[in-house]
Amino acid sequence: MLETPSSLLVMLLLTHVVADFILPFKRVMASPTFRSRWLGLLALACLHGLAVFLLLALARPSVANAALAGLAVAVSWLAASQLIPRLSRQSIVKLLLEHATHTAILVGI
């Protein structure tokens, strides 16, 4: 199922959509307390990293490379989610920049 790079990319993008739009972490991150928002964001970053790790570990025999890619995705996802909202006040610009960055990271993987 994950033999070709294009099928792997499709699975990575589908996982991103599920984690960002379907799972209930966004409600946690909308919490008024900083700690709840930070924990929700950290959990979501770890979920993205874990999903990338699992998909790459299934697709390629190198578990070390999959772990490194998962860690890179988690850290870059967390950094992008923290930095991009500070760049613009318009919510649509923030949404587009954030997801364009996340997509670029996944395409890079």
Image (cartoon, helix red, strand yellow):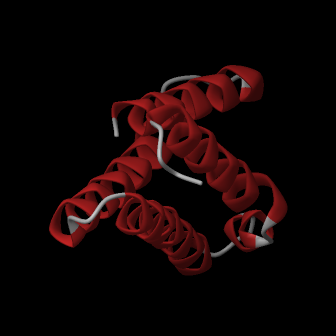
x and y percentages locating residue 72 in the rendered image: 27, 54
Could you say which is closer to the camera, residue 88 or residue 56? 56
x and y percentages locating residue 16 in the rendered image: 63, 50
Q: Which residue is located at x 60 percent, y 33 percent?
A: 99
Q: Is residue 19 left or right of residue 27?
A: left
Image vertical order of residue 36 relative to residue 53, above or below: below
Quarter containing the N terminus: bottom right
Quadrant in which residue 7 is drawn: top right
Quarter containing the C terminus: top left
Q: Is residue 62 left or right of residue 109?
A: left
Q: Which residue is located at x 43 percent, y 31 percent?
A: 107
Could you say which is closer to the camera, residue 86 or residue 51? 51
For the image shown, how many numbered marks are present on the structure?
0
Quadrant in which residue 93 is drawn: top right
Q: Is residue 16 left or right of residue 67?
A: right
x and y percentages locating residue 40 in the rendered image: 59, 74
Could you say which is closer to the camera, residue 19 or residue 1? 1
Image vertical order of residue 2 relative to residue 92, above or below: below
x and y percentages locating residue 10 in the rendered image: 62, 39
Q: Which residue is located at x 83 percent, y 61 percent?
A: 22
Image vertical order of residue 2 relative to residue 64, above or below: above
